[in-house]
Amino acid sequence: MRIKTFFVAALAVPTLATMVCGTWIVADLWQAYSGNGRARDETAALAALAQAVEVYAVQRGNINVSMLSESPVGDAMRKSMEEERRATGQAVSKALRLMQGLKRSPSDDMETTLSAIGKRIDDLD
């Protein structure tokens, strides 16, 4: 074997091993990056759903106050209730939009359930 061939082979083997290890590391990092993106999207959807529940609780509180009041509901309370109803609708729409953006989500069931809850709220008013 010639010295030139020996040096080329001696450099090629570690270079090839380095390329294989580098490819493996990059693939592993890409998988972690993709998983983090999914986790971010799922967290955003759950945060929007939690905000929708919070806005609904505020809306429900004003409905309860007006139902327990002995006097008729005033214009200010009606205006407040209408603003809260709009805010609840927007929060629920945002939560549904984010849930539908997930690849694996029960968004159809959630949409049906949330629509039924919205209808029940509207029936209370």
Image (cartoon, helix red, strand yellow):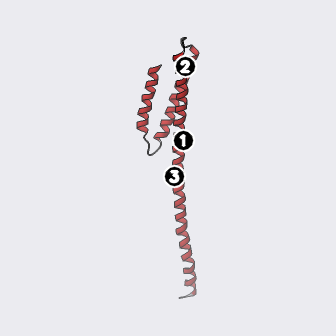
Q: Which of marks 1 and 3 is nearer the N terminus?
A: 3
Residue occupying the point 47% across, 36% down? 96
* Mark 3, secondary structure of its residue: helix
* Mark 2, secondary structure of its residue: helix
Which residue does the numbered mark 3 point to in the structure image?
35
* Mark 1, secondary structure of its residue: helix
Q: Which residue lies furthest to the top in this view?
A: 71
Circles 3 and 2, Cβ within 8 Å, touching? The answer is no
Classify 10 Å Cα crowding around label 1: few (below 14), some (14-19), many (20 and above). some
Q: In this view, does 112 lie above or below 37?
A: above
Q: Earlier in the sequence, mark 1 or mark 2?
A: 1
Residue occupying the point 53% across, 57% down? 30
Which amino acid type corresponds to the residue marked 3 in the rendered image? Gly
**Total number of numbered discs in the rendering:** 3
The foreground one among 40 and 53 is 53
Q: Position of residue 34 (x, y in %)?
A: 52, 52
Q: Earlier in the sequence, mark 3 or mark 2?
A: 3
Spatial CA distance of label 1 from label 3 is 14 Å
Q: Position of residue 69 (x, y in %)?
A: 54, 15
Circles 1 and 3, Cβ within 8 Å, touching? The answer is no
Which residue does the numbered mark 1 point to in the structure image?
44
Which amino acid type corresponds to the residue marked 2 in the rendered image? Val
Nearer mark to the viewer, of 1 and 2: 2
Which residue does the numbered mark 2 point to in the structure image?
65
Spatial CA distance of label 3 from label 2 is 45 Å
Residue occupying the point 52% across, 32% down? 53
Spatial CA distance of label 1 from label 2 is 32 Å
